[in-house]
Image (cartoon, helix red, strand yellow):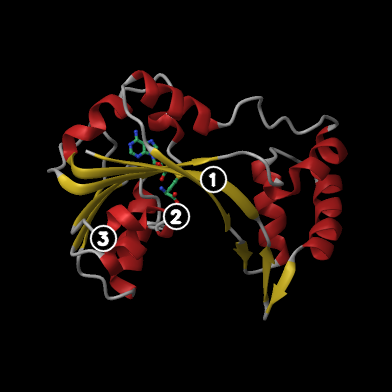
Amino acid sequence: MLAAAAPVLSECRSALDVGAGFGALALPLARRLAHVTALEPAPALAGALRRAATRAGLANVTVIPAAWGEAAPAPHDLVVCAHVGPLLGGGADFLASVGEVARRAVLLVRDAGGGDKFFYAELYPRLLGRPYETGRRCGASDTLETLSRLGIAPVVAPIEYRSDQPFATLDEACEFWMTYMKLAGEAPRRFLRGFLAARLQRDGDAWVAPLRKRAVVIWWRR
Ligand SMILES: C[S@@+](CC[C@H](N)C(=O)[O-])C[C@H]1O[C@@H](n2cnc3c(N)ncnc32)[C@H](O)[C@@H]1O
């Protein structure tokens, strides 16, 4: 994602990451830039990000535990917002106002659809009795249409990346799928155990779900 925005990244010294999660972008950005502010409203994720920054020896990360609109962050050279549906969807006013805190550039990332999320194409018919609907439109189209209405003509770069999901045990992996698919009972859990044992890859004692994703990186200069 950062490579796709390399031309503008090299012009920035600070970044505000809106909806930073546990720092998938905030931490790599902090290795490149002088300062990163991470806005993250979920307390568990804000805490995980603080701990990860400390573990990585990154003293240049400030975490603000708040949502967009709840805090008034100072302007930064770059504003980043990746995979935050409520802010990047067509109706949200984030896209209209984000430029006010971006001195040089704005960088957005949206899923481009496709790929097999968590083996759902196979698991939905087998465990829920219905096909997995991925939706007719991908999120990126909404964002790009709104930007066009706002008179913004961004650079749009399609990317592919790995979003592998690690699990300490096979039980933990089963619990993950049970929760995400809202399943209950022993029969689906038994099925998942066999299915995941065959599909996940071993990494020492751990298990890894290999997941490839497609996204678009959207950026523009102010
Ligand atoms: C799918 S995660 C993406 C995390 C990270 N940007 C990444 O790409 O890995 C979405 C994140 O946005 C945060 N979020 C949701 N609504 C938000 C809002 N209104 N303002 C700021 N962050 C928000 C969530 O708490 C969550 O951490």
Element marked by disc 1: strand
Quarter of the view holding residue 69 = top left
With 147 as the anchor, is 174 left or right in this view?
right
Query: Is there CB contact under 8 Å for labels 2 and 1?
Result: yes
Residue that appears at 78% across and 41% down = 121
* Amino acid type at image mark 1: Ala
Percent x, y for residue 163?
Answer: 58, 57
* Amino acid type at image mark 2: Met
Which residue in the structure is indicated by mark 1?
Answer: 215
Percent x, y for residue 110?
Answer: 48, 40
- Mark 3 close to ligand 1, CB under 8 Å: no
Task: Give the answer, above or below, for where 113 lies relative to 135.
Answer: below
Percent x, y for residue 95?
Answer: 32, 28
Is residue 154 or residue 81 the one in the foreground? 154
Q: Earlier in the sequence, mark 3 or mark 2?
A: 2
Which residue in the structure is indicated by mark 3?
Answer: 10
Is residue 35 or residue 13 the one in the foreground? 13
- Assign the N terminus to one quadrant of the image: bottom left
User: In the image, ligand 1 is in what quadrant?
Assistant: top left
Using a 10 Å C-alpha cutoff, classify the residue at mark 1 as few (fewer than 14 neighbours), some (14 to 19) or many (20 or more). many
Element marked by disc 3: loop
Task: Give the answer, above or below, for where 139 lies relative to 123.
Answer: above
Which residue in the structure is indicated by mark 2?
Answer: 1
